[in-house]
């Protein structure tokens, strides 16, 4: 919970439908609390796996591979994408949502790293 006592669950539920558009108001109002992590919590396997350098490396490699794959797509594929982007409101909004989430994620990761004193 945060200092402002704003519950996170409504924003998480709405983010399944609205994506970043539902999360941004929460992060505007959110004040991160100092973490209360016990030493034995850090040793549990899910946390060890999710915070390992191997997991970060694999996720980075997959993301880089997707960017390279998109960059190597032919001109016809990109023209078709931009046509759909202009004509379909759903694709337009989804792309903007993905861009917002990707843009804000370094901020959220930095906040998490700072609160954990990494």
Image: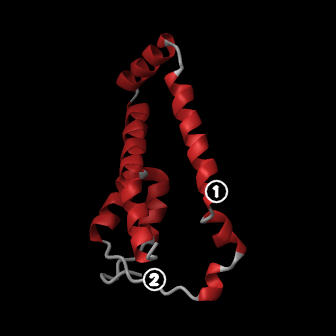
108 vs 64, nearest the viewer: 64
User: How many neighbours does mark 2 have within 10 angstroms: few (below 14), some (14-19), or many (20 or more)?
Assistant: few
x and y percentages locating residue 36 in the rendered image = 49, 87
Residue lying farthest left? Answer: 28
User: In screen coordinates, is 60 left or right of 23?
Assistant: right
Kindly identify which numbered label has been placed on residue 67.
none
User: How many neighbours does mark 1 have within 10 angstroms: few (below 14), some (14-19), or many (20 or more)?
Assistant: few
User: In screen coordinates, is 30 left or right of 63?
Assistant: left
x and y percentages locating residue 74 in the rendered image = 52, 13
Dot 1 corresponds to which residue?
55
72 vs 95, nearest the viewer: 72
Q: Secondary structure at mark 2?
A: loop
Indicate which disc, 2 or 1, sits on the residue closer to the N terminus. 2
Q: Residue at x 40, y 83 (%)?
A: 34
Dot 2 corresponds to which residue?
35
Q: Secondary structure at mark 1?
A: helix
């Amino acid at each position: 919970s945060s200092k402002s006592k704003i519950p996170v669950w409504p924003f998480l539920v709405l983010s399944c439908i609205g994506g970043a558009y539902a999360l941004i108001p929460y992060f505007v109002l959110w004040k991160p609390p100092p973490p209360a992590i016990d030493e034995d919590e850090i040793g549990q396997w899910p946390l060890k796996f999710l915070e390992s350098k191997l997991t970060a490396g694999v996720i980075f490699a997959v993301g880089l591979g997707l960017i390279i794959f998109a960059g190597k797509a032919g001109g016809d594929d990109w023209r078709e994408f931009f046509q759909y982007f202009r004509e379909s409101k759903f694709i337009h909004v989804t792309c903007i949502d993905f861009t917002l989430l990707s843009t804000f994620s370094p901020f959220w990761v930095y906040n998490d790293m700072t609160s954990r004193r990494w």
